Image (cartoon, helix red, strand yellow):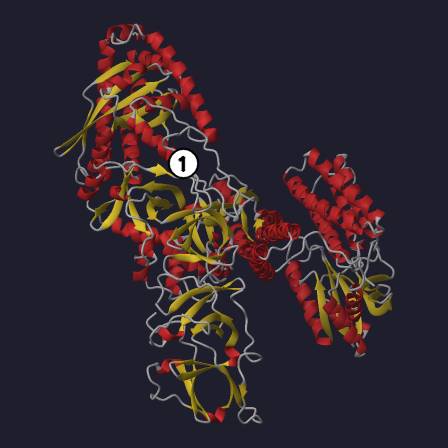
Amino acid sequence: MGFSLGEYQDMFLEEADELLQELNQNLLKLEKNPSDDEIINNIFRAAHSLKSSAAFVGLTDLGDLAHKMENLLQGIRDKVMKVTPAIVDVLFQCFDVINDVIREVSSGNPPSKDFSSLVKKIESVGQQGNIKEEKKETPAPKKIQLSTNIIKDIRNGINNGLSCCEIAISLDPDAAMKSLKVQLVLTNLEKIADILVTIPTIEEVSMPEFDNRVQIILLTSATVEELKKACEVDQVTRIDLRKIELVKKDNKVALKYHEQETLFEEKPEEEIKVRDVEEDVIPDEEEKDEIVIRSKDDKKTLQLRTVKVSVEKLDQLLNNVGELVIANSGFYKLYEEMRRLNIEKSIINEFKNRMEQMSRIAKDLQSGIMKTRMVPIGQVFSRFNRLVRDLAKEFDKKVVLEIKGEETELDKKVIDVIGEPLMHLIRNAVDHGVESVEERRQQKKPEIATITLNAYQGGNQIFVEVSDDGRGLDLKKIKAKAIERGLASPEMIANMDKDEIYNFIFTPGFSTSDVVTDISGRGVGMNVVQETVNELNGSVSIESEPGMGTRFILSFPLTLAIIPAIMVRVQRELYAIPLSDVIETIKILPEEITTIEGHEVINLRGEILSLIRLNNFVGIESGLKDNERMPVVVVGYGNRKIGIVVDLLEGKQEIVIKSLEQNYRTVPGLAGASILGDGSICLILDISSMINKVIMQQDTFSFKEKQRVLGAKQASVEVVKTEVATKEQPVKETIASQSKKEIKETLLEKEMPIKEDIVFKKEPEEIVEVEEYKDSEKKDISKSGKDAVIEEKVHSVLEEFKTELKEKIKTTLDKKDEIYQKLGISDDDLAKVQVLANVGITDAAESLSKIINRRVDLSIPDVSVLPIESIPQSFGDVDSVYLGVYMPIVGQINGTILFSLREDSGYELVDMLLGLSQGSTQSLTEDGESVLKEVTNIVGSAVVNAFADKIEMAIKPTVPSVVHDYMQSILDSILAFHTAENEYALVMDTEFFHQDDRVIGKLLIMPTTSSLATIVERLRN
Amino acid sequence: MNNELLNIAAKTAESVIDETDSLDILQLVSFKLDEIEYGIDILSVHEILRIPEITRLPNTPEYIKGVINLRGNVIPVVDIRLRFGMQQVALTELSRIIVVEIGEKLVGLLVDNVHQVIRLSRSRIDEPHDLIEGISTEFISGIGRLQDRLIVILRLDNILFSDEQ
């Protein structure tokens, strides 16, 4: 007969489970904020609820325990007690025990836990934590929870004529080397007895928590006297012995403790608490089997709400449902047949209704099962709160765990196994990554270290990160160890980059105890981490900065999960492109394709886009007619993109990726296969490999060829927004012609409901760019959704602001003298500024030359003060696009530094500074951007420093940002996002010379109005 | 549906019995290509299918006919004729896919027909020799003699991948 608590059991178990979760979470919080009343109240409430519901279903013991917890908490709530680590520990232990009870009950077993020791503990910590009265603790025999195996051993031992007893020894609290004493006792005992269990273990004896009392359970044929003798070691103050017998009680095997006999005591006057007969009830092995058999017909055997199901079973189920869907399609044929046979209409209709209903159910079932495989990672992450807390205590460090991205969904298979590698990484982070509090203090780091768990999706991958802000990996030590272990020669190591060296830590057994501390344990379990991740086709990468911390990034392909994909056809063959790789889909005319060195490209809005024809890639003829517009799927991977020319865009669909390796092997260009609702197979393209192949060719294109293509007409791109369902009725709409209009989805009644609209991530923005470049006046075309609204607002605010400003300075425009007069600046002042600027710029030229290792000269020939409004005109060419790098300045002077030059000049400057031949740079690359930022930083800082020195004020430029736009827009964005009080700017023409090349830009210092006044005033003195 | 499972032992093939008393009996699923009879150990045969829809697999050798959906498993199909370097023929009503287990993998073998199940004493199997026309010995584990018939017993290990891959 299975154990049951009656009809409310279910409710109780669910509730208790939830309460426990809540208690655990809140207690963790309380530990951090011991004085937070609200948390205490929450814990108190939850404990109270637990008490009531336990008592309600008849679990009185559990109720009592909860009651004790409640009392303890009440003390805390009423401020008569402090939250001590001991209290928190005891509470956690209670939660664990209660959790065990819940598990037991839910699996149909009566609770076997004994709470008395915990209750005692609660009482004792209650006294310790008590602020008013402190009482000395007396040693009480601890209740020992014995595992079934030990019980079995005891039974066997007793059956073989040995006697079982528990010996408890107390050590002098002041004794030195306690573990040695205990070890001595154990060694003595081992000669005459079989020791089954020692509590605490010999390792725990050396811990500070050791309460000077050791309990040993053993089987022996020796006499009491012999045992006593064995235990008589120096500084053992007391020896207690209890005989243990096994008794049967209510079909359970119980451990019966006899009365305690004190064999030896140094201070007999001390009060000793002795418990009478105690019982430790453990279900008998044989009995258990019987219970299981019986529980089969016991309808009340209940489970918790969640059921653990193997992924294999889910896969099997998914396959079966797939079959069901296919089998169901057989009814359609039958239906056609019935119609042909002129069977009565009402019957046919009824048949059709039923058939459709069944098809719907089958599909719901299919998608339902697919979704069951996806699980948010939060449940894995939250487990680690407790681990980090326990580890931090263990290693005596202060660590908080920060959790991000817990809602990220991963395939069940990944979720199931990711716990272990994460555990190892976190363990290592706490043990080895994070420094001791002392060390952190010395390094001026916050005492509390942070370990961050983060999960997010990027492209076709899911990333899970474990990072710490500890000491970082020690490259030197890893290198030394790798050489020592013969994993690489010193020469090899010298040629390795950081990543390769970090990878050594994954070598099995790489870091064992013989390694010097700092990096050591990093190897423990690292091999497990890598193996687990590899099994899931994932990878691990490491970023580490000495003194700053280490970040482990695990990435998994989405291939385990369901992914949305765009389905395309070449002739009749169907291929899927993961939607995460797709930037947009467009249609182009065949004549817009140009070839560069044999490769097809188009000029897509001023950018060269390499094309790859899917039919060539898969080795068949294209089904496109000669003059037909060609559908192109623009895909991107990293910052590269290409266009895939297909015959037909079919639509969007959710697919489950199946590996080809399982029964075959990886096929170049394919990421896998998917089985569609009708049972047919569709192959999934591996976009990254396709792109890599094409990009390698593209990189070899000569500059001249590229120029030729870019000089030619841009492709008349037609963007395909919606492409619905059937071949007969493709619905196309162009966004270019009706950019702002919300395009309504065209819904067709279709036989294949799986196909949905194609949704694109980026395309509207791209269109905006086209429009912007055409018109000189910046038009703000909606970007999409929220962004658009925000942008529009900003824009209208700016417009207002500008008009206002215009009004204000209308009179002063073009009347320099008046401005100077208004600001109180004389020509003398300007001359001073000029000198200062030149001092600064000389410094800048020097540092710049040093950095790029080539002589670059700089000069500032002209300095003027201009109202912000007239700055665009001062650049002369309002219709050109400019590159602007701005750095907000902070300190006693506030404002912004802007270094700006025309796009082409910017590229020339990049070429000059990167040592490329003039004309190499044709677009703003990442390198180019960082060069410009660096130049601005150097030049801007040098000039600002020159000023700061002169006017004796602290001014500091901050991080530069790049804007690539019309001058007005550049200014707008600076004014909008930084400060809107700038009225005037100090404009300095800046010339860069290198050999015969000369590039001119403008350096603008735009102080806030009040700061400008300060500068002028200070300059005077 | 077209991927109908045939129970060949029960339906399509008669059993030819030879020296039934011995424990040392090998059962073979046999098929004929160009008048030569081939046999596959029945223990590695998973099932036999009529030809389902085959999805072509690009960027693979010609003898990989494609992949099929076997109850939710994607399995490759090897065209045995092309694998053995023979002339390709059109599919017929008799064409079948013999699904075999090679290691952990399930692989479909496209054959012209499935002939019968043969029981053969191991004593009647000779080492492969070079007399078999056309096909490479890497695919042959032995030659069985049954009355006046010769049966080429196939070794499947190398059937899926070529050496050069």
Q: Chain of mark 1?
A: A
Q: Is residue A1008 left or right of residue A845?
A: right
The residue type indicated by label 1 comes to Glu
Q: Is residue A299 left or right of residue B4?
A: right
Q: Is residue A364 left or right of residue A442?
A: right
Residue A847 in the image, given as x and y percentages of width and height: 24, 34
Is A946 above or below relative to A45?
above
SS for tag 1?
loop
Is B91 above or below relative to A875?
below
What residue is shown at x 53% (from left), y 40% (from top)?
A447
Q: Nearer the viewer, residue A445 or A645?
A: A645
- Residue A459 appears in the picture as rendered: no
**Quarter that holds the C terminus of chain A:** top left
Q: Nearer the viewer, residue A803 or A356?
A: A356
Residue A1005 in the image, given as x and y percentages of width and height: 31, 21
Residue A797 in the image, given as x and y percentages of width and height: 43, 18
**Residue assigned mark 1:** A733
- Residue A382 appears in the picture as rendered: yes
Q: Is residue A989 left or right of residue A499?
A: left
What residue is shown at x 33% (from left), y 48% (from top)?
A645
Within 10 Å of disc 1 (Cα), the crowding (few <14, some 14-19, many 20+) is some
**Quarter that holds the N terminus of chain A:** bottom right
List the single residue furthest toward the left.
A996
Residue A721 in the image, given as x and y percentages of width and height: 42, 38
